[in-house]
Image: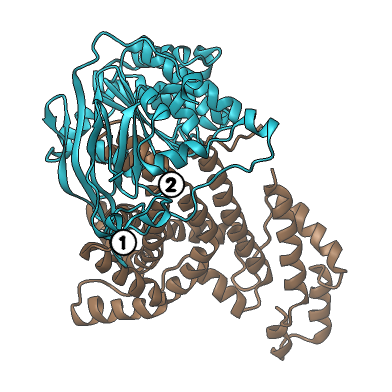
Chain colours: A cyan, B brown
Amino acid sequence: MSASTTQARPVPAAVGQRLLEISGLKVHFRTDDGMVRAVDGVDIGVDRGETVCVVGESGCGKTVTAMTVLKLIAMPPGKIVAGSIMFEGRDIVPMSPAQMRAIRSKQIGIVFQEPMTSLNPVYTVGQQIAETVRHHEGLSKKAAYERAADMLRLVNIPSPQRRVHDYPHQFSGGMRQRVMIAMALSCNPKLLIADEPTTALDVTIQAQILELLTEMKERLGMAVMLITHAMGVVAETAQRVVVMYAGKVVEEATVEDLFANPRHPYTQGLIRSIPRIDLAATTHTRLEAIPGTVPSLLNPPKGCRFAARCRYVTEACLAAEPPLVEKAPGHKAACIL
Amino acid sequence: MIAIPSLLGISVILFTVLALAPGDPFEELATNPAIPPEVRLQLRASLGMDDPIYIRYFRWLFAMLQGEWGFSFVSRINVDQLILQRLPTTLIVIGSSQILALAIALPVGVLAATRPYSIFDQVVNTLAFVGFSLPTFFTGLLFIMFFSIWLGWLPFVYNTNITATGWQWWWEHIRQSIMPVLVLGLFQGAAWTRFVRSAVLDVIRLDHVTTARAKGLPESRVTIRHVVRNALIPVVTLVALQMPIVFGGAIVTEQIFRVPGIGSLLITAILANDTPVIMAVTFVFACLVIFFNLLADIIYGWLDPRISYR
């Protein structure tokens, strides 16, 4: 099923150099019921100019991982318990708030899931984009507005000169997400984190936004870390894929490899649960789902976290957690099989 | 635009209620043996008191529109003069107390909300709770006991005939305004602090605040431009809606501190059945309340671009 959905993409020249290296990251949240181990030892690397998809069900720690890279999680109750986040060779974890502010938007831009609520309703989109570039690049008010209009043009918003003066409520959901992307890219960051940027949008708009992200990436040459729960999005955009489950990475591979030869039963389940129009038309099979739900991260099970839902579960799975090991060159999985 | 019909409606209700209310300004004359009943009846007729209510209402309305507010039955002074004597005092006392209340509520509420459940927040919450639980007539008496009687720092009766000149005159006026302003201001301030805190807490966890942080803006700018600015919208509504209560509370405070404002004028007029004065003062209150609502609508349109006036 992989060959038809993924084709080789042009690889930018700068690939090969690590831009972001998350290793051993643990983020825990203190709640009334106890510690929630939202992210429990995650390793993700992103090369320059590369698109990495982080995929997994709701509640598996994808968003927390993304937010932690910019330290946008609420601390407290959140806490980075262990691990490092190296960005261009510098560790983000011990950085001061002032150092973080210099990285946000300027080095790493972020697009959120909800375009309807992510913009401030009382300022024009121009003001909101201009605010970012004025803060980071010290542009004059006029120059900042020109940059804002340029950014709107870049993300294909019609009549940008007029639209910069409009308020968010005068834009549709898809258009607002374009504004968010324009804002995130306005300072030309080296990395764009997109946290489920299409989840809240109509299907047709989703495709447009993904196309826009790919186009932006190619024009501006930045790296993209795309958080999603849709395997279809992964197949369409990613070069490398990281599959997360219950706060851990369970598999990592190139997109071709992952779809051709998924090693972890969870990944196999995710791929099987993609709706397929060709099968729906011919046979009367129901859409496959992975039974059960993600285990509570308050008190995760001792062995493999997927064991309770796994069709190949063995004694060994329940006894100890399988480590993430290289099964083939560039293909890692955390499964004893 | 709705203001004019509202005022007309208010005036109709006021007039009818006052006309139907028991009590007669001529009661005093009735008990006076020097005035025979015929004279009293003649007086009534000459003042138009025996006409039907609606005729009297229209007569009042047209006179009012021409700036003819009638004269007080009791003091024989024109009502507009009487009100103009008293209104500035009330507006100054209420105005400064509301400014004081906002000056307390905005910074304290915002600071408490940005540090939820900290010691500062808990102290603020407790004080605010105490502040708005104590009625103004109680705190007013406490203040008089403490500052005027025990410490002897402040006068407890408001004096309009201050003879001093220059700086001394200002000083005396400020000294005697401190207590009424504090009593009203602290009470409102306590209530508003809690409201500002919850309004800010509502905004602070919205997505667009995270967006603002993701831009790399300093926390102070995020708070002022992206949190407080949005939280002001419900605060303006509350402040405007509370204006009638504020004027009501001012009547009580004016009585306690003997402030010769419009509130104490109303009380004396009611006790004396001085209908023209009651009518005019309540109408002025209604105008003030409607004016503040109008002001709130204007500020609203300026704060929230989603509301537009065509």
Q: Does B74 sit left or right of A52 as displayed?
A: right
Circle 2: is it few (<14), some (14-19), or many (20+) Cα within 10 Å?
Answer: some
Disc 2 target residue: A58
Callouts 2 and 1 in the same chain: yes
* C-alpha gap between disc 2 and disc 1: 16 Å
Q: Quadrant of residue A337?
A: top left
Judging depth in this view, the residue of B85 and A66 nearest the camera is: A66
Q: Does A86 sit left or right of B196 as displayed?
A: left
Which image quarter is the C terminus of chain B in? top right
Q: Please name the amino acid that badge 2 sits on.
A: Ser
Q: Does A5 sit left or right of B127 as displayed?
A: right
> Which residue is painted at 74% across and 87% down in the image?
B30
Against A147, is A175 above or below?
Answer: below
- Image location of residue A75, percent across then percent down: 24, 51
- Image location of residue A184, percent across then percent down: 36, 25
Picture disc at residue A134: none
Q: Does B38 sit left or right of A275 as displayed?
A: right
Q: Is label 1 in a helix, a strand or a loop?
A: loop
Which image quarter is the N terminus of chain B in? top right
Q: Is label 2 in a helix, a strand or a loop?
A: loop
Picture disc at residue A298: 1
